[in-house]
Image (cartoon, rainbow, N blue to C red):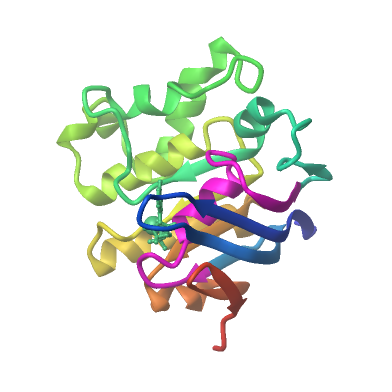
Amino acid sequence: MPVQEALRIKELSKVYRAKAGDVVAVDGVSFEARKGEVTVIVGPSGSGKTTLLYLIGSLESPDGGEIWAFGEDIASPAADLIRYRRERVGFVFQFFNLISALTALENVMLPMDLQAVPGSRQRGRAEELLSRMGIDARLQRAKANKMSGGEKQRVAIARAMANDPDIILADEPTGNLDTATGRVVVDILVKLAREDGKCVIIVTHDEDIVKVADRAFSMTDGKLAPHDR
Ligand SMILES: Nc1ncnc2c1ncn2[C@@H]1O[C@H](COP(=O)(O)OP(=O)(O)O)[C@@H](O)[C@H]1O
Ligand SMILES: [Mg+2]
């Protein structure tokens, strides 16, 4: 799988305005991330990790800087953000964010886009993705609220892959899992980079995850620095 630059972030910043004073959540962050590679950003709570990931996924808009994704600046007003979110990005969250009353299969099919996955292919693709994540046929038909944390996160990863995005953004993906289960989830994310050529970005407070990184950074008070391993 040839390595290809997916993201180039330049001097990115985000300020939250609050009565008690402004918070510079992301402060002049620059880095690059590639397809086929795992980038890990480690930092304590409040250091700006979630905000940075939301900026990259265009769930928040920046106050300054550039986010070049496959040659397009998605921080520019002219960017086609709906298309970017639909075709380029898959999110994995700490608290899974599944719809609890729906089955695993339904959760994975829900975000599928007719252009990315034709209607006749949606169920089959969801089954394939879930099987690959180790969710068997019986569990695929179980409601999300009947599942363990590890199972939920594997379903959430299948959902993130629904439209075959180029970039997978994972926010504390092991934060709600025990160590062994967390390791399984990290291994899956690594495979999505190594085998599927995805650009995987994991933000976490867990220093241990740095071990799997191709590129690692630390985040402190909104600023990014190379991680000294
Ligand atoms: N919606 C918001 N409004 C105001 N302040 C926020 C908001 N979201 C985050 N913050 C603040 O921005 C800083 C970074 O938060 P966050 O990105 O959630 O960090 P992390 O994910 O590393 O814990 C913190 O000081 C947090 O309190
Ligand atoms: Mg966070």
In the image, is 130 to the left or to the right of 163? left
Q: Locate residue 130, reporting x and y percent.
A: 41, 37
Q: How many marks?
A: 0
Q: Locate residue 35, reporting x and y percent.
A: 70, 55
The quarter of the picture where the N terminus appears is bottom right
In the image, is 34 to the left or to the right of 159? right
- Report whether residue 172 is seen: no
In the image, is 227 to the left or to the right of 132? right
The quarter of the picture where the C terminus appears is bottom right
| Residue extent of the magenta highlight | 41-68
Residue found farthest to the right = 71
* In front of the other: 139 or 72: 72
Q: Is residue 74 above or below residue 80?
A: below
Residue found farthest to the left = 146
Q: Ligand 2: give its quadrant.
A: bottom left
Q: Is residue 131 magenta?
A: no
Q: Is residue 22 above or below residue 179?
A: above
Question: Residue 96: which quarter of the image?
Answer: top left
Residue found farthest to the bottom = 229
Residue under the point 64% across and 65% down: 29
Q: Is residue 39 above or below residue 72?
A: below
Question: Residue 171: which quarter of the image?
Answer: bottom left
Residue under the point 49% across and 22% down: 124
Residue under the point 35% across and 67% down: 45
Residue under the point 54% across and 55% down: 52
* In front of the other: 117 or 57: 57
Q: Locate residue 182, reporting x and y percent.
A: 32, 62
Q: Locate residue 156, reporting x and y percent.
A: 38, 40
- Report whether residue 211 is seen: yes
